[in-house]
């Protein structure tokens, strides 16, 4: 049998249900939906029953705060445009 690693996914929007990511030893990655009829999910549950534990979900880091120039650019302005609009030299 191929060695696998399982990692929990982020909860689905509006629920506490999480999916599972399976990474096979050959590097292939599968997303497994928690559904009783899903045979991959059943294999995951059997793996858990054998005393294994999945890797926990780790949320990605928060994106960095945009700079003032990036904020202005997002609305089509430059710092000079803003200064002109505010009458600042």
Image: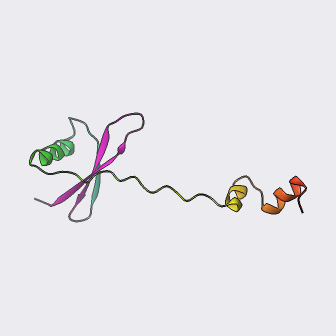
In the rendered image, the vertical position of residue 37 relative to residue 52, given as above or below: above
**What is the image's colouring?**
rainbow
Q: Position of residue 64 (x, y in %)?
A: 55, 59
Q: In screen coordinates, is 88 left or right of 2? A: right
- Residue extending farthest to the front is 88
Question: Looking at the image, which residue is at 79% across and 61% down?
Answer: 79
Q: Position of residue 39 (x, y in %)?
A: 18, 42
Q: In screen coordinates, is 26 left or right of 62? A: left
Question: Looking at the image, which residue is at 14% across and 46% down?
Answer: 48
Question: Looking at the image, which residue is at 71% across and 58% down?
Answer: 73
Residue 70, magenta (yes or no) = no
Q: In screen coordinates, is 20 left or right of 45? A: right
- Residue extending farthest to the bottom is 26
Question: Looking at the image, which residue is at 62% across and 58% down?
Answer: 66
Closer-to-camera residue (31/11): 11
Q: Position of residue 20 (x, y in %)?
A: 28, 47
Quadrant (top left, top right, bottom left, bottom right) of the C terminus: bottom right
Closer-to-camera residue (79/89): 89
* Number of numbered discs visible in the structure rendering: 0
Q: Within the image, what quadrant is residue 88 found in?
A: bottom right
Residues shaded magenta: 1-26
């Amino acid at each position: 049998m191929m060695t696998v690693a399982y990692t929990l996914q982020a909860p689905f929007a509006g629920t506490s249900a999480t999916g599972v990511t399976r990474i096979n030893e050959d590097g292939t990655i599968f997303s497994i939906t928690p559904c009783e009829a899903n045979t991959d999910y059943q294999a995951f549950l059997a793996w858990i029953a054998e005393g294994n534990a999945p890797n926990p979900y780790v949320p990605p880091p928060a994106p960095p705060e945009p700079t003032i120039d990036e904020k202005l650019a997002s609305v089509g302005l430059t710092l000079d445009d803003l200064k002109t609009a505010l009458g600042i030299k």
